[in-house]
Image: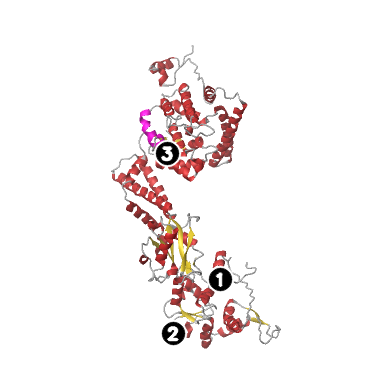
């Protein structure tokens, strides 16, 4: 005897109890047979819906080529998760198996048929044969008539749920039409469906994906996976299985995972728990969060952005100025370089308008230290991201407080999700603030026009953000303008020591560096201290406790003159009564004093002996009006004879110096330091170098 037990409630015609009783009566003597099982279902579906498939060899070749393409995508996807060689080998064998299954199920994706057979098969409303064929036929018809942009295979994401007939066939198989109609309308099929917002956002970033409607595609697949389930599994679908069902030769894994992240934040009925996705007819936390976010005013949101920025800039302390409105809010007179981070009202301004505004801030007549400022301008899109994220942070903080106080009743799982989302959104706000400023305007000397300065714009968008605080990143962008090192020779050159003057007050010199645009910008006055300390080795002199009388420098004590040896930076005072001296004046002051310690005279003689002078005018074959000299010297000796060379140049109608320098340090020389501290001075002097290395 052969009898049939219907697999669905619909086919039982109300006599489900009789079928159960019959099953029990013959359970010990019957031999059950399923008409089709597992991969046989694919062939049945293929033959029933496309009876002529395979008659044309070209059709089979298309199926084989599609199988090969999907197998390659599948293998690459699996290999990204593989950690061992065995897992990589398994990925290859599984890819080959998928290629065979694609040929058997073409034009359907094997995972779509698996979903229906293994997941929906557990539902009492599902009709394994007639209902499944009806649903697939409706899906194919909707795609054929232009209801969607299909991939080479029809997968879970290609089911056009916006089509009324497809939707009817879908609910006929899975049931629960009344409970899920509103869910579909709000998140997937309605004119204001939130998945469409994700479609538009992805299409804006990557126009090639516009026709694929990636957000709607991913949401449709999750909806199909939300019903039924494999034995022993929780409801919904794991992310890895979902991604496998969605990727294709035209749709990359990274795009899919990004889309899933956006869907979690946008959709109202999508639930994501334990890395499994499912739709449920109860709202998720997004609706609760969005309602809480609406209660915050614009100024409150902006204050939250400002508070986060203040925390980001905290390591810079008083070197960073946050949102100054007028010039008087920017301190003046402090010997350090500052960056003014301008407020949100600057974001929408055009470049010329922003430059005009910054010029007014710099060109304040009361301001002295104009060479110690730069101005960071926020980007409009970046500011909007920061505002939106700050609003979410405020909403989540409020909800967490309400949950803790018992004003909101949520499940334990949702409370944990709230905490996790607050952590994630907080990190996003931090990142938004760190990337808020997109360009910096820095005043530099104007060497051609009538203005004392011009503004140079530095674009920050190509900079790496990670791993550095905001102010340090901007200072790095300004490294060609703002220096943390200074050569003593540069001080001598800028102050014209030994040329137009023999000494200059250190406090005046400091003021020049931080107020005159022709001077290099220094990070702070410690750079000047260190340079003066190094310069006393032979480039310049330094004295404290001095004063000017009748245009001449008067010393309180000669032993306070520093020259001929290195002076620690912490012993350099930049206050009143302190002066830097030309080498000539320093030698004169020290020479009047004579050696101050036993053995110093002998040492000086030894130093002088190491200055080797070869040749004279006669040896060089020059006339009495000419002079030539060749010598080897240490750094200190060279700087001591510079006044002599200057004297010679002043008396000569032609003066040519050929210099060969060999300098060696204990550690490798930093190329950036060499460029800024050494080679830049040659360039400014117009000297061509040969063989510098």
Query: Looking at this view, is 534 or 625 the one in front?
Result: 625
Please tell me whether residue 151 is drawn above or below residue 49 in the rendered image: below
Whether pointer 3 and pointer 2 mark residues with C-beta atoms closer than 8 Å, the reply is no
Which residue matches tag 3?
195
Report the number of numbered marks: 3
Whether pointer 1 and pointer 2 mark residues with C-beta atoms closer than 8 Å, the reply is no
What residue sits 53% from the left and 32% below the top? 153
Please tell me whether residue 672 is drawn above or below residue 134 in the rendered image: below
Please tell me whether residue 306 is drawn above or below residue 145 in the rendered image: below
Which residue matches tag 1?
684
Badge 3 or badge 2: first in the primary sequence? 3
Q: Residues within 10 Å of mark 2 (few under 14, many from 20)?
A: few
Image spot of residue 184 (x, y percent) = 39, 33
Image spot of residue 214 (x, y percent) = 47, 39
Q: Nearer the viewer, mark 1 or mark 2?
A: 1
Q: Nearer the viewer, mark 3 or mark 2?
A: 3
Write down the region rendered in magenta: 177-189
What residue sits 36% from the left and 30% below the top? 179
């Amino acid at each position: 005897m052969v009898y049939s037990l219907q697999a669905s409630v619909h086919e039982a015609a109300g006599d489900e109890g009789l079928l159960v009783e019959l099953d029990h009566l013959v359970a010990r003597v019957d031999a059950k047979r399923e008409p089709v099982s597992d991969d046989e279902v694919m062939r049945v579906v293929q033959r029933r819906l496309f009876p002529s498939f395979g008659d044309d060899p070209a059709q089979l070749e298309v199926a084989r080529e599609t199988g090969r393409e999907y197998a390659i995508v599948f293998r690459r996807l699996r290999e990204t998760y593989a950690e061992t060689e065995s897992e990589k080998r398994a990925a290859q064998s599984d890819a080959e198996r998928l290629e065979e299954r694609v040929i058997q199920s073409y034009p359907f994706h094997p995972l779509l048929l698996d979903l229906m057979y293994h997941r929906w098969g557990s539902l009492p409303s599902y009709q394994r044969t007639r209902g499944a064929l009806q649903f697939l036929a409706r899906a194919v018809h909707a795609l054929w008539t232009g209801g969607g942009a299909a991939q080479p295979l029809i997968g879970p994401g290609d089911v056009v749920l916006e089509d009324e007939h497809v939707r009817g066939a879908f609910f006929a198989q899975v049931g629960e039409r009344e409970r899920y109609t509103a869910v579909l309308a709000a998140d997937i099929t309605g004119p204001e469906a939130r998945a469409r917002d994700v479609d538009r956002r992805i299409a804006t970033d990557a126009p090639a994906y516009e026709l694929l409607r990636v957000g709607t595609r991913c949401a449709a697949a999750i909806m199909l996976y939300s019903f039924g389930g494999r034995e022993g599994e929780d409801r919904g679908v794991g992310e890895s299985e979902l991604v496998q069902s969605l990727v294709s030769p035209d749709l990359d894994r990274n795009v899919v995972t990004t889309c899933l992240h956006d869907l979690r934040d946008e959709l109202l009925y999508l639930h994501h728990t334990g890395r499994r996705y499912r739709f449920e007819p109860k709202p998720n936390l997004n609706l609760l969060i969005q309602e809480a976010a609406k209660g915050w005013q614009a100024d409150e949101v902006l204050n939250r952005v400002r508070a986060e920025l203040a925390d980001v800039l905290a390591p810079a302390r008083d070197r960073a100025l946050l949102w100054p409105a007028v010039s008087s809010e920017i301190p003046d007179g402090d010997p350090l370089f500052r960056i003014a981070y301008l407020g949100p009202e600057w974001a929408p301004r055009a470049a010329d308008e922003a430059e005009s505004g910054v010029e007014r801030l710099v060109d304040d007549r009361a301001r002295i230290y104009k060479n110690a400022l730069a101005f960071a301008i926020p980007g409009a899109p970046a500011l909007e991201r920061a505002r939106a994220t700050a609003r979410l942070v405020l909403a989540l903080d409020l909800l967490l407080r309400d949950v803790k106080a018992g004003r909101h009743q949520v499940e334990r799982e949702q409370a944990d999700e709230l905490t996790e989302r607050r952590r994630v959104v907080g990190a996003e706000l931090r990142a938004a603030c760190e990337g808020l400023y997109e360009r910096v305007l820095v005043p530099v000397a104007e060497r051609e026009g009538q203005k004392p300065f011009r503004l140079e714009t530095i674009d920050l968008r190509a900079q790496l953000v990670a791993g550095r605080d905001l102010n340090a990143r901007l200072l790095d962008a300004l490294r060609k303008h703002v220096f943390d090192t200074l050569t003593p020779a540069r001080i001598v050159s800028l102050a014209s020591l030994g040329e137009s003057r023999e000494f200059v007050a250190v406090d005046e010199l400091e003021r020049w560096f931080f107020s005159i645009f022709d001077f290099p910008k220094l990070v702070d006055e410690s750079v000047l201290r260190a340079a003066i300390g190094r310069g006393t080795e032979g480039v310049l002199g330094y004295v404290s406790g001095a004063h000017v009388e009748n245009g001449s420098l008067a010393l309180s004590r000669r032993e306070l003159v520093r020259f001929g040896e290195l002076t620690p930076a912490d012993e350099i005072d930049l206050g009143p009564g302190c002066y830097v001296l030309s080498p000539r004046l320093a030698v004169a002051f020290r020479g009047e004093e004579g050696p101050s310690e036993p053995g110093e005279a002998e040492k000086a003689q030894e130093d002088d002996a190491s200055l080797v002078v070869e040749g004279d005018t006669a040896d060089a074959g020059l006339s009495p009006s000419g002079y030539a000299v060749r010598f080897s010297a240490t750094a200190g000796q060279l700087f001591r004879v510079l006044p002599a060379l200057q004297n010679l140049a002043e008396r000569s109608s032609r003066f040519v110096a050929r210099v060969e320098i060999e300098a060696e340090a204990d550690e490798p020389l930093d190329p950036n330091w060499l460029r800024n501290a050494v080679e830049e001075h040659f360039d400014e002097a117009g000297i061509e170098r040969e063989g510098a290395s």
